[in-house]
Amino acid sequence: MKLLNKLNNEEIIIIQVMHSIENSEYRNEIINLKDGWLEQ
């Protein structure tokens, strides 16, 4: 996660799919999906 955070700070876009709430602390934005649809 530290490597992904470093790359993101260098303005590299990273898309990561995860099920862990703990790892979400490294994110800039969270997009939730439910039954294959974006949730607002």
Image: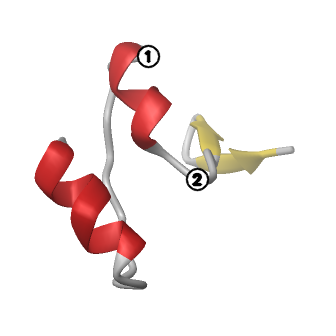
Task: Identify the residue at horizontal 13%, vertical 55% (top origin).
Answer: 3
Residue lying furthest bottom: 11
Q: Is residue 8 above or below residue 18?
A: below
Task: Identify the residue at horizontal 32%, vertical 46% (top origin).
Answer: 17
Q: Is residue 14 visible?
A: no
Please state which amino acid type lies under the numbered disc 2: Asn
Q: CA distance from mark 2 to mark 1?
A: 14 Å
Q: Is residue 9 or residue 22 the one in the foreground?
A: 9
Residue 21 marker: 1
Considering the numbered disc 1 on the image, is that residue within a helix, a strand or a loop? loop
Residue lying furthest left: 3
Residue lying furthest right: 40
Q: Is residue 32 or residue 14 the one in the foreground?
A: 14
Could you say where residue 31 lies in the image, as x and y percent from the top left? 63, 49
Could you say where residue 16 lies in the image, as x and y percent from the top left? 31, 54
Q: Is residue 38 above or below residue 10?
A: above
Mark 2 surroundings: few (<14), some (14-19) or many (≥20) residues within 10 A: few
Q: Is residue 8 above or below residue 29?
A: below
Which residue is labeled 2 in the image? 28
Please state which amino acid type lies under the numbered disc 1: Ile
Q: Is residue 40 or residue 5 the one in the foreground?
A: 5
Mark 1 surroundings: few (<14), some (14-19) or many (≥20) residues within 10 A: few
- Please indicate whether residue 28 sits to the left or right of residue 7 in the image: right
The quadrant of the picture occupied by the C terminus is top right
Mark 2 and mark 1 lie on one chain; the one further toward the N terminus is 1
Task: Identify the residue at horizontal 55%, vertical 47% (top origin).
Answer: 36
Q: Nearer the viewer, mark 2 or mark 1?
A: 2
